[in-house]
Image (cartoon, rainbow, N blue to C red):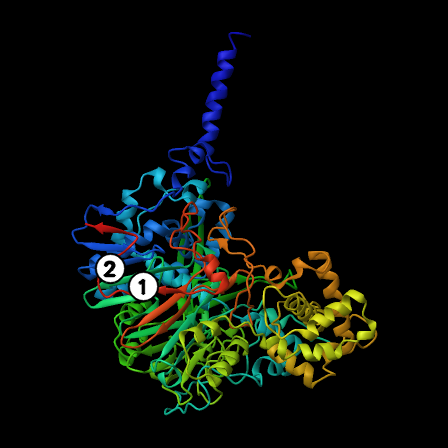
């Protein structure tokens, strides 16, 4: 036995060495990870970096990067190449993992490093044509010398930083997930832009609306999806008169019914958040110059989706936030103008039911003839496993997806082809290249002509005194309601019949009311002659902003900051009085009565310290479900739920609306019974989930504002950020979504800006600058943005890139 001990010891040592250097599932090689010299300990920042020079191989230029007290970089360069090289280098230094992981995602390549757990997402990304669209975009970028030069300089900067790294200097996420950064190429910038299109223009209701028409009838769809809420307050107001005639398109005689809807028998009788922007003219401000604000509402992550910086070189001096992976500033200002964006949510994603000639799927029927399909072989590499080869069929509409029945398993699958704005060749980077250099309204308009998608409401203000807003993007010229249901892939009348001319896009300049605004609501009043969509954000934020701006004068920056933080719930104010009126107080218990009193006393402000907002949200959700769930759950088919705006109006005006009755009971229910049942369910559910009424019932906890790490790595997130606001408030924070960048800019002889985002410049969780602005964001504080015309004499530290 004694002679065997050394053998056992050696085997144990070998096994230990092997295990410590091997990745098991999602667990990193622990030996590498805990190595005090090269593991995660090496990522800790304990002091402010020192100023110095960095000699970069292949970089023949010169750029100075000054970091202010918040570590925001201000880049001063001798020319554009040096400027964008330095931008790429600095962004990679602070956000390398974020740069890479988001473009891996957009390219359908996550599984290369994360294994089979992300395979389905990668396959869906490929089948939706995301890489195909990026390749088309890259062709346009290559054809534009300025764009091509900027993204190549940016890529050179990223690669210069990557090449300077040794494994011990890799960001901690690489050590946790056990992979290494790869070379950055221009196609990745194209992937990034397509990822934004997926985020902002990647939703549709086609199948659900087709099913809803077939199941509940066209009158139901007319009532809830065609008729607009009375309180609608469109982005471009009715006072705007159009000086053009729409370009006509042909419309089919009848509406196509897809296979999924055909099998439905006749029925026998989460909302998201958006963004805000606005600009007020000098006639309404104390300074006499315009003030512009923007707060795009997106999924909140650590690190932030945005990276704050200043870019200065001959011909350009701009400040704002950038997207990691694209050169330039996306939202911001320069010495003459300011701009911001909110999402349009136009219908630019349509599904077409395809008729194939046979099982080979080599031909499909369109316009009374058989046409050939094309094949694209997608190879998805999977870490630790064999690569997956996926054949994606393309028609002239786009890539084809198989659709199986949820009702009849014996039905042959249907095939739907996707027509999507993400597949259209585009160069959005050129839009921001020109905006960064814009001097006036004409330059702003010219820059917008390059943007294809995702469509954005571009707000504008200039020191010359102009304010404007363009609902901008490339919009298909559709007949009324085209694309809100699944389209007939055999009939050319369902094809996109050209585009709305750029000049016909909804827009307004210097309106008499003295302000422009958008909050993702309806783009234009009913007299606008083109169809964009039937599904926009609820009216609530847009109307609240317009109400407030209309009554304000002598406006200051502080007033605009306060409006960004407005917590008023138009939603509650337009239904809670009726809910309380329908509620039978005599049937309530003690706890229920106390809850009711809190709601009666509530001023409709979604403030973190209050319990009433939590009660209302829960009650409304239960009440809405009690009206519709019995009917909607009577089929397995996916159906489209009505918007709360119209539901409230219908219930208040039609107390005998047939859906109030529960089809699963013999008696006929009333609104009063629905209100009582849902209120009791609210108190019961709150108690079960959060305990007895008290601290845990407060809105700041109930709304669950977690800010997750971009890859959902445990321990790297900010959990349950206690904050005011809600999705229907101007301060639209809720459930991990919200204002990803708050900005206020005052135009004038000296342009001044203020801003904040939830996070910090660094993507390193070991840095104090990882979440250094989170508390300021939570409380609504804005930092003054140090916009410099020349290199500063005072700074936190400085890097010279040579």
Q: Nearer the viewer, residue 643 or 120?
A: 643
Instruction: Identify residue for label 1.
Output: 786
Contact between labelled residues 2 and 1, with CB atoms less than 8 Å apart: yes
Question: Is residue 663 visible from the viewing direction of this image?
Answer: no
Q: Residue furthest left?
A: 60
Using the numbered discs, state the Cα–Cα distance from disc 1 to disc 2 in whole angstroms.
10 Å
Q: Residue furthest top?
A: 2
The crowding category of the residue bearing disc 2, from other C-alpha atoms within 10 Å (few below 14, some 14 to 19, many at least 20), is few
Residue 296's place in the image compared with 51, above or below, is: below
Q: Position of residue 73 (x, y in %)?
A: 30, 57
Q: Earlier in the sequence, mark 1 or mark 2?
A: 1
Residue positioned 50% across, 76% down in the render: 483
Q: Is residue 60 left or right of residue 269?
A: left
Instruction: Identify residue for label 2.
Output: 792
Q: Nearer the viewer, residue 190 or 729?
A: 729
Image quadrant for the N terminus?
A: top right
Local secondary structure at mark 2: loop
Q: Nearer the viewer, residue 403 or 673?
A: 673
Q: Is residue 623 left or right of residue 485?
A: right
Q: Position of residue 365 (x, y in %)?
A: 46, 71
Q: Nearer the viewer, residue 142 or 407?
A: 142
Q: Is residue 623 left or right of residue 201?
A: right
Tally of marks:
2
**Quarter occupied by residue 787:** bottom left
Residue positioned 80% across, 66% down in the render: 590
């Amino acid at each position: 036995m004694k002679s065997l001990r050394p053998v056992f010891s050696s085997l144990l040592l070998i096994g230990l060495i092997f295990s410590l250097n091997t990745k098991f599932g999602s667990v990193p090689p622990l030996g590498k990870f805990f190595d005090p010299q090269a593991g995660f300990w090496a990522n800790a920042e304990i002091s402010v970096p020192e100023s110095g020079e960095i000699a970069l191989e292949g970089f023949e230029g010169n750029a100075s990067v000054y970091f202010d007290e918040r570590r925001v970089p201000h880049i001063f360069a001798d020319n554009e190449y040096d400027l964008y090289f330095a931008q790429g280098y600095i962004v990679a230094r602070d956000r390398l993992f974020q740069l890479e992981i988001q473009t891996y995602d957009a390219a359908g390549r996550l599984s290369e490093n994360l294994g089979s757990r992300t395979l389905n997402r990668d396959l869906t990304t490929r089948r939706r044509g995301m890489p195909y669209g990026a390749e088309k975009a890259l062709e346009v970028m290559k054809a534009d010398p300025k764009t091509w030069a900027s993204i190549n300089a940016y890529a050179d900067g990223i690669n210069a930083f990557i090449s300077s790294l040794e494994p011990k200097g890799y960001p901690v996420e690489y050590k946790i997930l056990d992979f290494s950064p790869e070379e950055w190429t221009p196609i990745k910038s194209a992937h990034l832009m397509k990822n934004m299109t997926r985020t902002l223009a990647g939703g549709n209701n086609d199948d659900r609306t087709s099913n809803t028409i077939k199941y509940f009838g066209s009158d139901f769809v007319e009532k809830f999806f065609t008729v607009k809420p009375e309180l609608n307050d469109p982005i471009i107001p009715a006072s705007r008169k159009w000086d053009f005639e729409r370009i006509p398109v042909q419309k089919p005689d009848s509406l196509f019914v897809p296979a999924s809807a055909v099998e439905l028998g006749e029925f026998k009788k989460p909302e998201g958040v958006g963004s805000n922007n606005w600009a007020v003219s000098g006639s309404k401000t104390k300074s006499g110059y315009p003030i512009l604000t923007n707060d795009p509402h997106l999924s909140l992550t650590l690190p932030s989706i945005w990276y704050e910086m200043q870019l200065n070189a001959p011909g350009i001096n701009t400040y704002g936030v950038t997207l990691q992976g694209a050169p330039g500033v996306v939202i911001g200002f320069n010495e003459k103008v300011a701009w911001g964006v909110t999402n349009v949510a136009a219908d630019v994603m349509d599904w077409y039911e395809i008729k194939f000639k046979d099982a080979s799927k080599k031909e499909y029927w369109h316009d009374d003839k058989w046409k050939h399909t094309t094949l694209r072989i997608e190879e998805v590499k999977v870490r630790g496993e064999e690569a997956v080869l996926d054949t994606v069929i393309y028609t002239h509409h786009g890539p084809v997806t198989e659709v199986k029945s949820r009702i009849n398993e014996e039905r042959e699958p249907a095939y739907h082809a996707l027509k999507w704005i993400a597949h259209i060749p585009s160069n959005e980077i050129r839009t921001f290249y020109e905006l960064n250099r814009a001097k006036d309204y004409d330059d702003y308009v010219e820059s917008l002509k390059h943007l294809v998608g995702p469509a954005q409401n571009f707000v504008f203000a200039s020191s010359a005194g102009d304010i404007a807003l363009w609902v901008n993007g490339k919009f298909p010229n559709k007949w009324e309601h085209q694309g809100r249901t699944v389209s007939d892939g055999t009939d050319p009348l369902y094809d996109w019949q050209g585009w709305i001319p750029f000049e016909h896009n909804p827009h307004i300049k210097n309106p008499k009311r003295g302000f422009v605004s958008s909050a993702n609501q309806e783009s234009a009043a009913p007299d606008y002659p083109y169809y964009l969509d039937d599904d926009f954000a609820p009216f609530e934020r847009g109307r609240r902003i317009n109400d407030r701006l209309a009554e304000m004068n002598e406006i200051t920056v502080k007033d605009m900051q306060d409006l960004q933080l407005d917590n008023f719930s138009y939603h509650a104010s337009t239904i809670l009085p009726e809910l309380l009126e329908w509620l039978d107080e005599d049937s309530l218990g003690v706890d229920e009565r106390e809850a009711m009193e809190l709601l009666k006393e509530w001023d409709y402000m979604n403030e973190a310290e209050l319990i009433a907002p939590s009660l209302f949200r829960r009650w409304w959700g239960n009440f809405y479900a009690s009206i519709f769930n019995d009917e909607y759950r009577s089929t397995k088919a996916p159906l489209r739920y009505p918007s709360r705006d119209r539901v409230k109006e219908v219930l208040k005006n039609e107390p005998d609306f047939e859906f109030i009755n529960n089809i699963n009971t013999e008696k006929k229910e009333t609104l009063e019974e629905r209100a009582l049942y849902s209120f009791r369910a609210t108190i019961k559910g709150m108690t079960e989930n959060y305990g007895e009424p008290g601290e845990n019932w407060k809105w700041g906890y109930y709304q669950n504002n977690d800010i997750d790490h971009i890859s959902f790595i445990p321990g790297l997130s900010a959990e349950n950020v206690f904050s005011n606001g809600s999705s229907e408030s101007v301060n639209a924070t809720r459930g991990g979504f919200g204002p990803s960048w708050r900005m206020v800019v005052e135009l004038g002889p000296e342009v001044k800006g203020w801003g904040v985002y939830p996070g910090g410049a660094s993507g390193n969780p070991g840095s104090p600058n990882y979440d250094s602005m989170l508390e300021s964001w939570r409380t609504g504080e804005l930092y003054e943005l140090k916009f410099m015309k020349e290199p500063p004499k005072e700074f936190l530290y400085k890097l010279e890139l040579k």
